[in-house]
Image (spheres, rainbow, N blue to C red):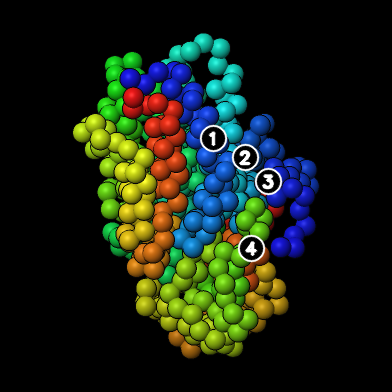
Amino acid sequence: MKKIINDPGDVVPEMIDGLVRAYPQYVTRIPETEAVVRSDKASMDGKVGIVSGGGSGHEPAHPGFVGKGMLSAAVAGQVFTSPTPDQIYEAIKAVNTGKGVFLIIKNYSGDVMNFDMASDMAELDDIPVKSIIVDDDIAVEDSLYTQGRRGVAGTVIMHKIVGAAADQGASLAEIEKLAKEVLPHINTIAVALSAATVPEVGKPGFELADDEIEYGVGIHSEPGYRREKIKTSRKLVEELVSKIDSELKLDAGHKYAVLVNGMGATPLMEQYVFSHDLLDELAKKKIVPAFMKVGNYMTSIDMAGISLTIFDLVDEKWLDYLNYPVETIAW
Amino acid sequence: MITVEIVDKWMELFYQKISEQKAYLSELDTPIGDGDHGNNMMRGMQGVKDGLAKLSEPDLKLTFKTIAMSLISKVGGAAGPLYGTAFLEMAKNCEETQEPAELFKLALEGIKKRGGATTGDKTMIDVWAPVVDALAAASLSVEKVKEAAEGTRDLVAKKGRASYLGERSVGHLDPGAVSSQYLFESFIAAGGIK
């Protein structure tokens, strides 16, 4: 393992410290936690608070999306481990201005349980809390026999939509309704070239041969649906788009937003090559995205790979929410 | 009858066991999870140890509550809320009963409710449920606990991260079941079922 760290056990607190000191204009640490809250507290007045978070290792998610127009606070757990309820609860308290708090949770058993416990704690304090569990990863069958689809890069889209609505004064009930409407239209699929190494573990989460790739890998190295020899960018795009097409039924009459997301160790150069092929592939279907982002949004430490999120803009207003200005480190 | 002395001894032995087996638990977690169960449980048990050391009077409810809150605030992931809920249920009910059979049964119900899993899903419940049954029949033994944890090897995971592997999870022990095995072995060694 070769990483720029000190003690592997100190990675999370030192990372949060570095982040808040580098960007004091956007985020401030909530004392004695690994949670960050907007520095511009006045921007939260009279608005519903939006809290997200999860294990660390996905940077810039989630603290990078804290700021006016997006998240109010983000809670960071240990690497690939859900944050604890007491910390989530501190974040809820820090952003509640009397209008309630909305939680954006990724669909992992740990995250769901810890955020649930934090909601229970907030309810005892009469803070109204609602939540959405994001499960945009179409690599997994949504079956009764698994945890269900995972929450991956599409979660950032949820942050953006919900954050914009909250900034425009939407109520807690309106935000919950919006999140539920948006959710089924966000679909993501990934391909991994190599696995991530958790600092405290010291070795990669799975093994892939030098010339091998795996489709459908999750953001904590969860297994995907197929392994094969590395292909050209064009072929990778074909596979990922066809997988999304089978789920979303891409239609030239619809408007789409696209997020090309690097998994941590894939250079932007490759992400733009992939985007070039993606736009060509979509053009064959007579689709030109109405909104597009390329870069590292929801990473998996040092995993090499890319994920593709396609968001069907069923409601015209959703595009406005995506274009709504924000003041964050990473959007 | 569970007493504060037994719980203190129980936690001391469990702490030792987790310290010794930390690397093994994380190793078990690597093929079917994300390789951190040992580290997470160690962080939690360090919290339990520190928390219990601060208690000034021998109060069973406060002892259980301290264990629960330490685990909830230190472990994270899925194991934190699940173990934490188990001890929170014991804290809530230990004034009515100090019988391990009854307290562990209530703890098990809490775990099921929190995690939504049931017997046979290849989780810690596959150790907790047989332990509760054996306690009710006054037949709990170290062998039975170990056998229950071993039994998770042949199961297909239906909850948590291991569930994404489906059939490929067969052949691996469930790390939460093994840490639960250590928990009950420590309980027996602490004189919990005398």
Q: Which badge, 2 or 4, comes first in the chain's sequence?
A: 2
Instruction: Tell me the subunit letter for badge 2.
Output: A
**CA separation, marks 3 and 1?**
19 Å
- Numbered disc in front, either 3 or 1: 1
Please give left or right for residue B115 compared with residue A325 in the image.
left
- Other residues around mark 2 within 10 Å, as few (<14) / some (14–19) / many (≥20): many
Question: What amino acid type is highlighted by mark number 4?
Answer: Lys
Label 2 to label 3: alpha-carbon separation: 17 Å
Disc number placed over residue A35 in the picture, else none? 2
Q: Are marks 3 and 1 on the same chain?
A: no
Q: Residue at x 49, y 80 (%)?
A: A227
What subunit carries mark 4? A
Q: Which residue is mark 4?
A: A203
N-term mark: 2 or 3 = 3
Please name which of the two marks, 1 or 2, marks the residue nearer to the observer.
1
User: Which one is in front, A27 or A166?
Assistant: A27
Residue in the image at 70% along x and 73% along y: A267
The residue beneath circle 3 is A9
Q: Are marks 2 and 4 on the same chain?
A: yes
Q: Are marks 1 and 2 in contact (CB under 8 Å)?
A: no
Q: Amino acid at mark 3?
A: Gly
Q: Amino acid at mark 1?
A: Tyr
> Mark 3, residues whose alpha carbon is within 10 Å: few (<14), some, or many (≥20)?
some
Question: In which quarter of the view is residue B1 placed?
Answer: top left
Q: Residue at 71% across / 45% down in the picture? A: A10
**Label 1 SS:** helix
Of tags 4 and 1, the one toward the viewer is 1
In the rendered structure, the answer to whether residue A283 lies left or right of residue A28 reads: left
Q: Nearer the viewer, mark 2 or mark 3?
A: 3
